[in-house]
Image: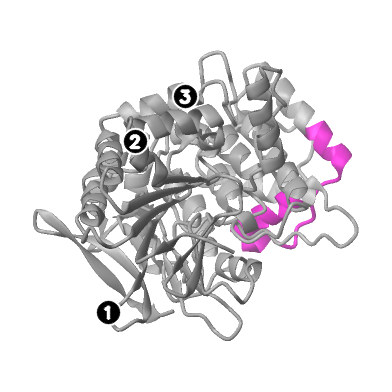
Amino acid sequence: MLVPQYHAVHVISDIHLGGTPGFQIFNQQEALVWFIDYLRALPENQKIALVLNGDIVDFLAEPAPAHEKECYFRPLHAMADLTRIMCDPSFEKIWKALTHYLQTSNRFLVLVLGNHDVELALPEVREFLTGQLCRDDDAARGRLTFAMDGTGYACRVKDKNILCIHGNETDAWNPVDYRTLARINAEKKRHTPLTPWTPNAGTKMVIDVMNGMKKKYRWIDLLKPETETVPALLLAMDNDAVTWSRVKKLFGVATDFVRDTHRGPDSFLGIDVMLSGEEPSEDKAFHTMMAASYPSLAEAASPQETQMDSLLAEMDAHVAEGSSPATFADDTGQPEFLGIWGAVWDKIRRRSPEENMREALQAWLDGDKAFDPTEQDNTCKSVRELVGPEVDVVIAGHTHLQKAIQGSKGSAAYFNSGSWIRLMQLTPELLQKEAFKKVWAVLEKGDMESLDNATVKGQPLIRHIRSVVSIQKEPDGNVLGTLATVEESGSNYNLTPVQQGQFTC
């Protein structure tokens, strides 16, 4: 297969440009501009590719139009959203730097589709973005590539085959429905009614649940690694979080997850739902999610479907009358909560949000090695299984966790380009009771500024890892793979290899 050939390929991902001020999880504009300019300044005779490997912008973080309550995919508003993002002072220098980069000879830019920026695949959005980045420069247009069909981007450095994919391809929570996307693209060109978009479970989780919670707790999507415990963490917080409408939405997300497991293997959020001939119920999926956060409740039985229907109807009636969830829970006339639903509710309504959150996080992060770049995770294993032995290096993103795993016989080397957003790493030391009091005091404030400035036990709560994966031909003829980070150096930056993150491919 004929594919582009480069002297070096540099990959970053999960920048997540988007969201209004106060809700933006990316705040590294100056560092990213430095990196783009650094690549532009490399010797002009070297053919260099910069790959933005998915989730470049974040349409899911953009406010929904006033007349739409839920906006999972917005083909009619994508142009306005992208225009706002490109003009936002927090991001506008990045787009200018990319424009200057493309105007330089032998500099190539590749945009890979993720699961938060699906609208970039729309033809008019691609053409608009091309016009903004390349102006009337036909040569620059020829150096810009959109990889938007779900197959990733293949290229070569010397004799090594490289494949860049976002990584959601093996994530049952976040598949992109490329068939429907292609149909919508055709319908837009024909000016015919658009096929309705069915969101995946991950998108519904963001729009239906997490975006509402972010109004108070803006740090929700900064915790890594993401697992099935996110719903239980949300329910653990306070009476504003534990609303019946939110419980019902989580219940619906569990249903969508069960549906999406038929599209591909689960790997990212980790719910182990076995599909052995009989489709698991939505109750079972939700039971699994909740039990993961509260190990002491793992043996509790889940309710029958008819009991759940009755319970949800009772919830709606009380909410319609203006009763709070806590009042309903204490009402002796309520139908009994059964199994895990009753145990979890009883637990969370009698304890403080701080206690609930600490227990859930301890269960979540027990023995966690997600931040170890040399530790294989499920995404690494499943992505490597996607590619044949002819692929020498596969590079993913999506998890926000940087990785560098050497190849073995018949298996490609694997890199994950991590993320450039804020990340929160809660170590076992920070989850001890006294230390967590200080952590919770910051989390309860909820705003980004408090998080950015917070230090507990000498550790900052927020990390900026700024990962870069580079595959390049060396003077000795070898092809070197490097996982590096952009580090501050006085008033400037430099590119620093990660320990054990560099090897010959």
Residue 236 x, y percent position in the rendering:
54, 46
Can you see residue 356?
yes
**Residue 282 location (% of width, % of height):** 78, 46
| Mark before the other along the chain sequence, 2 or 1 | 2
Residue for point 62% across, 37% down? 204
Magenta stretch encompasses residue 431? no
Q: Which mark is residue 157?
A: none
Residue furthest to the left: 490
SS of the residue at dot 3? helix
Q: Is residue 261 left or right of residue 148?
A: right
Q: Identity of the amino acid at label 1?
A: Pro
Q: Quadrant of the C terminus?
A: bottom left
| Marks 2 and 1 in Cβ contact (< 8 Å) | no
Between marks 1 and 3, how big is the CA–CA gap? 44 Å
Q: Badge 2 is on which residue?
A: 134
In the rendered image, which quarter is residue 94 located in?
Answer: top left
Residue shown at 9% from the left, 58% from the top: 490
Q: Secondary structure at mark 2?
A: helix
Magenta region includes residue 302 = yes
The secondary structure that most of the magenta stretch takes on is helix
- Magenta-highlighted residues: 285-311
Name the N-terminal-most of marks 1 and 3: 3
User: In the rendered structure, which amino acid carries the disc numbered 3?
Assistant: Met
- Give the camera-side residue of 298 and 251: 251
SS at mark 1 in the image: loop
Which of discs 2 and 3 lies nearer the camera? The answer is: 2
Q: Using the image, tell me which numbered label, if any, was put on residue 79.
A: 3
- Residue 389 in the image: above or below residue 453: below
